Image (tube, helix red, strand yellow):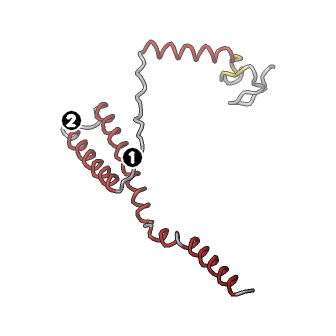
Amino acid sequence: MSLTALLLLSVVVAASFYFIWRPLPAARRLNPSSDHERSFLLAERERLLRALQELDFDYALGKVPEEDYPTLRAELLRRGGEVVRQLEAMQIPMPAFAPVEATPALSDDEIELLIARRRSERGENTGGFCPQCGKPVLLSDRFCSRCGRALKG
């Protein structure tokens, strides 16, 4: 090999080592504790939002005294604001939080209608009662699930 070829080969090897090893010190500069802190702050934000929803729900049900509610709510909002400010300082985009929607309340008549509809659906599948213990059985049952008596099929 000539001296020029060896020199060219050493330059190529040195350049490839440079491009391979150059990103590694930057990766070492990343602080794994910042990832841990970010994850902690996001979890704390989620926890505070859920606690705020639960507090509002409990207050609506009358479980939280009226004199304690404003203080508890203000404290949760203050702590939530601190967490959001810390996340913004870390320049972390805020994930969307979908509030839990309340199910609409059903009237007594609607509930009775649902119960009657369910009973009529089950009534079509019933095969009567066990002659020994009186438990309701289905048409497809060969034995009673309570006492084990063989049913006429």
- Amino acid residing under circle 2: Glu
Between residue 5 and residue 119, name the one nearer to us: 5
- Amino acid residing under circle 1: Met
The spot of residue 135 in percent (x, y) is 65, 23
In the displayed structure, does residue 64 sit left or right of residue 42?
left
Q: What label sits on residue 94 in the rendered view?
A: 1
* Secondary structure state at the residue bearing disc 2: loop
Residue drawn at x 31%, y 31% as measured from the top left: 61
The spot of residue 141 in percent (x, y) is 75, 24
In the rendered image, the quadrant that contains the N terminus is bottom right
Quadrant of residue 100 within the rendered picture:
top left
Nearest to viewer (mark 2 / mark 1): 1
Residue drawn at x 35%, y 43% as measured from the top left: 49
Quadrant of residue 51 within the rendered picture:
top left
Between residue 128 and residue 114, name the one nearer to us: 114
The spot of residue 95 in percent (x, y) is 42, 44
In the displayed structure, does residue 73 sit left or right of residue 25?
left
Residue drawn at x 25%, y 42% as measured from the top left: 73
Relative to 83, residue 121 above or below: above
Q: Earlier in the sequence, mark 2 or mark 1?
A: 2
Mark pair 2, 1: CA separation:
32 Å
Label 1 crowding class (10 Å Cα cut-off): few <14, some 14-19, many 20+? few
In the rendered image, the quadrant that contains the C terminus is top right
Q: Which residue is mark 2?
A: 66
The spot of residue 127 in percent (x, y) is 71, 17
* Secondary structure state at the residue bearing disc 1: loop
Residue drawn at x 60%, y 78% as measured from the top left: 14
In the displayed structure, does residue 133 sit left or right of residue 63?
right
> How many marks do you count on the picture?
2
Label 2 crowding class (10 Å Cα cut-off): few <14, some 14-19, many 20+? few
Relative to 28, residue 114 above or below: above
